[in-house]
Amino acid sequence: DVKVTQSSRYLVKRTGEKVFLECVQDMDHENMFWYRQDPGLGLRLIYFSYDVKMKEKGDIPEGYSVSREKKERFSLILESASTNQTSMYLCASSFSPGPQHFGDGTRLSIL
Amino acid sequence: EDKVVQSPLSLVVHEGDTVTLNCSYEVTNFRSLLWYKQEKKAPTFLFMLTSSGIEKKSGRLSSILDKKELFSILNITATQTGDSAIYLCAVPNSGNTPLVFGKGTRLSVIA
């Protein structure tokens, strides 16, 4: 079974802090994705990566950056957290073509 | 702009009922349509559909795609309380792998 592991289930941070969300997959997938999920807005793509050291902006990249130094790990960085970044963050990975497999999510609260 | 629209947005049924969830899409260079189920944590993959008219089935769940009319349906027969979840439909966007998600259908099955 595919395993996508996100480092934290729940996280509370303060405005202005730099926040790191980590995601690791164990299936040698080349593609990795970060989404946020908000009520009424559904899943929105923040960034994705097709390969190591490669990144592409999704629909809502503002205020975020990513890092993919190793194939199995994809990190999402909130450079200076703001309250409107309070959300559920979901990481996913996949082969091309193929379905995306999701981690359990990180519920992030910015106070 | 690529678009995925799901209906209804929410649905309440009694155990034993049969439900049909709808997903319509607009995307150039269609390749596939995916269904996910999301309970309290991560979306879990249900089906990937690529060909019109071929039903995919898993237990009480089944799904079919109509590429001419640009929609898919997900059927659940003899619903159980464990079917309560958000059901998400997604298609890869015109550019490449990232998925465009619908806003989901929240299904509640009551005893």
Image (cartoon, coloured by chain):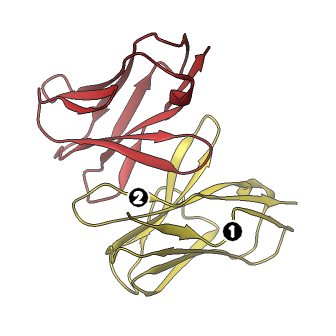
Chain colours: A yellow, B red
Whole-percent x, y for residue A36 in the image: 58, 54
Which three-letter amino acid code belongs to the residue tagged 1?
Ser
User: B11 and A57: which one is in front?
Assistant: B11
SS class of the residue under badge 1?
Answer: loop
Q: Residue at x 20, y 43 (%)?
A: B28
Which corner quadrant holds the N terminus of chain B?
top left
> Which residue is rendered at x = 18% and y = 22% of the image?
B69
Residue drawn at the location 53% of the way across and 13% of the way down: B15
Instruction: Give A100 or A49, whichever is nearer the viewer.
Output: A100
* Dot 2 amino acid type: His
Residue at the disc numbered 2:
A101
Q: Residue furthest bottom?
A: A69
A29 shown above or below A87: below
For the residues bearing labels 1 and 2, Cβ distance under 8 angstroms: no
Q: Is residue B17 left or right of residue B10?
A: left
Determine crowd level at label 2: few under 14, some 14-19, many 20+ residues with C-alpha closer than 10 A: many
- Number of the label disc, if any, that sits on residue A60: none
Q: Quadrant of residue B34?
A: top left
Cα distance, mark 1 to mark 2? 17 Å
Give the labeled residue for mark 1: A8
Depth check: give the residue in front, B66 or B84.
B84
Q: Position of residue A52 (x, y in %)?
A: 37, 85
